[in-house]
Image: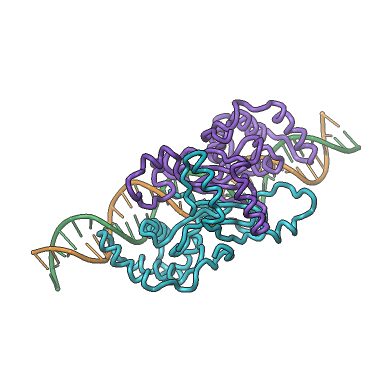
Chain colours: A cyan, B purple, C green, D orange
Amino acid sequence: MTTSPHGVGRSEGTAPAAWEDVPARLRARGLRWTPQRRTLLSVLAASTGHVIGSELVERCRAIDPETVPSTVYRTLDLLEELGIVRHAHGADGREEFHVLPTAEHGHLHCRGCRQAWEIGAGEAASLVAALSADRGFTVDLSHLSVSGLCRDCAAAMAPPRARPRRCSDERGPAPPRARPRRG
Amino acid sequence: MTTSPHGVGRSEGTAPAAWEDVPARLRARGLRWTPQRRTLLSVLAASTGHVIGSELVERCRAIDPETVPSTVYRTLDLLEELGIVRHAHGADGREEFHVLPTAEHGHLHCRGCRQAWEIGAGEAASLVAALSADRGFTVDLSHLSVSGLCRDCAAAMAPPRARPRRCSDERGPAPPRARPRRG
DNA sequence: GATGCTATTGCAACTTGTTGCATCTAGCTC
DNA sequence: GAGCTAGATGCAACAAGTTGCAATAGCATC
């Protein structure tokens, strides 16, 4: 999985059991199982890899056009507390959600082709160990974000000294926005 | 500098020469030296360490109340191309600008106390080397962002297994938003 | 099945930026 | 000093989220 490109982190329609579990887990905490949450859960169950928040809102709207963003984001916060999703920040600062994260991992973003890969604990081990030893810092691997150029893009941009480019100069037409919420 | 907390990365009112140079460098490229750019430059010259975009807009407004955000952000883009500033994404995805970056460095963010430190090339060397060797990936050190808990916060949160917290559960009252622009 | 408590929702407002476009102006030329 | 023209500005609209608050509605209870 550590070499899988963006969106390939998980197999289709992850383990059903994990999802069926959710209503009960909510109730056990005195929380409620609402139609809006049902919608989001069904969207997540059908999602793979990393998905940004606005994309999830769109998918929910496809099922229930009445969906409002605030409810989706609040539910995502809740699901993160339950460990159902996990979020990280992409190269451009936007939040990306992982569905049912199996192992903690960081992310590698190519600012050329805009693909993303996962960085396993093994690859980050030396950095994590160094920061721990030198500073007593405990790294949250799921928030590790590394930008740069993949092999292909680096080769393609080869010409002597490419000017320092903005992290998304290559972005398409209408640019989006990032989200800090409390992440 | 690698152990300096947020905002201590640079000494007060950095090297004057670097700033005096800007008008000429702009003109050499056929660009213009305008009052708005003069205002932003004076703000940057008086700034230290990392500053987020909205903070720069505020400081410009303190000098010239007519300042509009779009001009500030566009000028920052330009200054980044000139190497006068550099931006990175904080733990919450918001962009932070470094004034006159000396050496490339990544960032370490504590999600407990919200302080930030710089990660020097040395500390990141093993990760950079590993990614380069294994994947041919060229790391952009200035975009390296690591979150976690500093020694003190880790100790303070000690209790057995703290629940996985959002990256800014500890944030103050009114939360801001991140910015992807083209970064 | 009706009731009540409180978690949840939806709305509106706000934050931090970005973009398109019409207008203005810095600075080169004459 | 006046004219020109492309670069820069300012405005309005939009994007992606977050929050406070009043209204709604799960769901446990009776």
Q: Where does the image place residue B145, in percent across and percent down from the top left?
A: 55, 47
Q: Is residue B121 above or below residue A105?
A: above
Of the pair C11 and A16, the residue shown nearer to us = A16
Foreground residue, B39 or A166? A166
Asked if residue A97 is positioned above or below residue A45 in the image, the reply reads above
The image quarter containing residue B69 is top right
In the rendered view, does B36 fall on the left or right side of A157? Answer: left
- State which quadrant residue B12 falls in: top right
Rendered location of residue B42, percent (x, y): 63, 29
Image quadrant holding the N terminus of chain A, namely: bottom right
Q: What residue sits 65% from the left and 38% below the top?
A: B85
Foreground residue, B83 or B60?
B83
Q: Residue at x 46, y 56 (%)?
A: A87
* Residue sitting nearer the eye, C24 or A98: A98
- Is A130 placed left or right of B30 in the picture? left
Disc tally is: 0
Could you tell me residue B134's position as x and y percent?
64, 58
The residue at the point 53 percent across, 40 percent down is B54
Residue A159 image offset from top left, x and y in percent: 79, 53
Which image quadrant for residue A72? bottom left
Q: Is residue B11 left or right of residue A179?
A: right
Left-right relation of C8 to B63: left
Q: Residue at x 49, y 47 (%)?
A: B147
